Amino acid sequence: MKLFFAGSSLYVLYLMKVKFKAAYDPSMDTFRIEYLLGAAALLAIGTTLKYTILEALWTFSIWLESVAILPQLFMLQRTGEAETITTHYLFALGAYRALYIFNWIYRYSTEGYTDWVAWLAGLLQTALYSDFFYIYYTRVLKGKKFELPK
């Protein structure tokens, strides 16, 4: 399964960088991802449970995933609008993460399972989506074009 995931990720990169390169507008993509990488690295150093390479990398990936949507949200804010398919995709991503909260509650109540790093990062990610969820609900679900308030 990990090979499939890695292969499909490489295929998506190929599609983005080669096949659909003309659809990319670098003038709109001004988000500095170095800040996300740095913040995720610092959070990983501060919240890693065991200081092993694999554990530190796992913690880094959890924190990075929690803020990885910021460039897309930043671009939405800059352009002020999005294609309908993009808004549905972003909603599905956010809903997927928000549904994890129910899983955490269930696992905690039945197994006593806790994973504070995953919980905090997941709550951060869900909070980042919350503004988008509101606009999605008030615009897209009511049949209006997705445009940010001016």
Image (cartoon, rainbow, N blue to C red):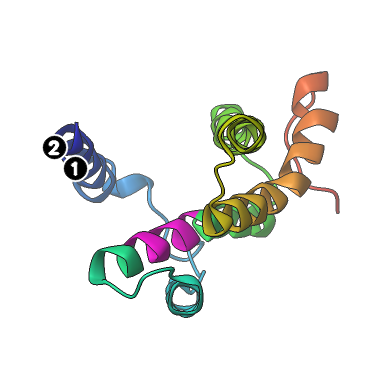
Corner quadrant of residue 75: bottom right
Seen from the viewer's position, the closer of residues 106 and 62 is 106
User: What residue do we see at 23% from left, 37% from top?
Assistant: 5
The range drawn in magenta is: 58-65
- Classed neighbour count for the residue bearing mark 1: other residues with Cα under 10 Å, few (<14), some (14–19), many (≥20): few
Task: Point out residue 51 in the picture as x, y percentages from the top left corner.
Answer: 33, 75
User: What residue do we see at 45% from left, 62% from top?
Assistant: 64
Is residue 76 one of those drawn in magenta? no
Give the SS element for disc 2: helix
Mark yes or no: residue 83 visible. Answer: no
Seen from the viewer's position, the closer of residues 101 and 126 is 101
The residue under label 1 is which amino acid type?
A: Ala
Query: Eyeballing the image, is 18 above or below 124?
Result: above
Query: Magenta part mainly helix, strand or loop?
Result: helix
Q: Is residue 5 left or right of residue 126?
A: left
Mark yes or no: residue 42 visible. Answer: yes
Question: Dot 1 corresponds to which residue?
Answer: 6
Q: Is residue 79 left or right of residue 50?
A: right
What number is the disc on residue 81?
A: none
Seen from the viewer's position, the closer of residues 74 and 92 is 92
Query: Eyeballing the image, is 57 above or below 120?
Result: below
Seen from the viewer's position, the closer of residues 142 and 94 is 94
Q: CA distance from mark 1 to mark 2?
A: 5 Å
Task: Point out residue 88 in the picture as x, y percentages from the top left corner.
Answer: 60, 28
Question: On the rendered image, what quadrant is the C terminus found in?
Answer: bottom right
Circle 1/circle 2 CB separation < 8 Å: yes
Task: Point out residue 140 in the picture as x, y percentages from the top left corner.
Answer: 75, 26
The residue under label 2 is which amino acid type?
A: Leu
Question: Dot 2 corresponds to which residue?
Answer: 3
Is residue 60 one of those drawn in magenta? yes
Query: Eyeballing the image, is 16 above or below 136?
Result: below
User: What residue do we see at 42% from left, 73% from top?
Assistant: 37
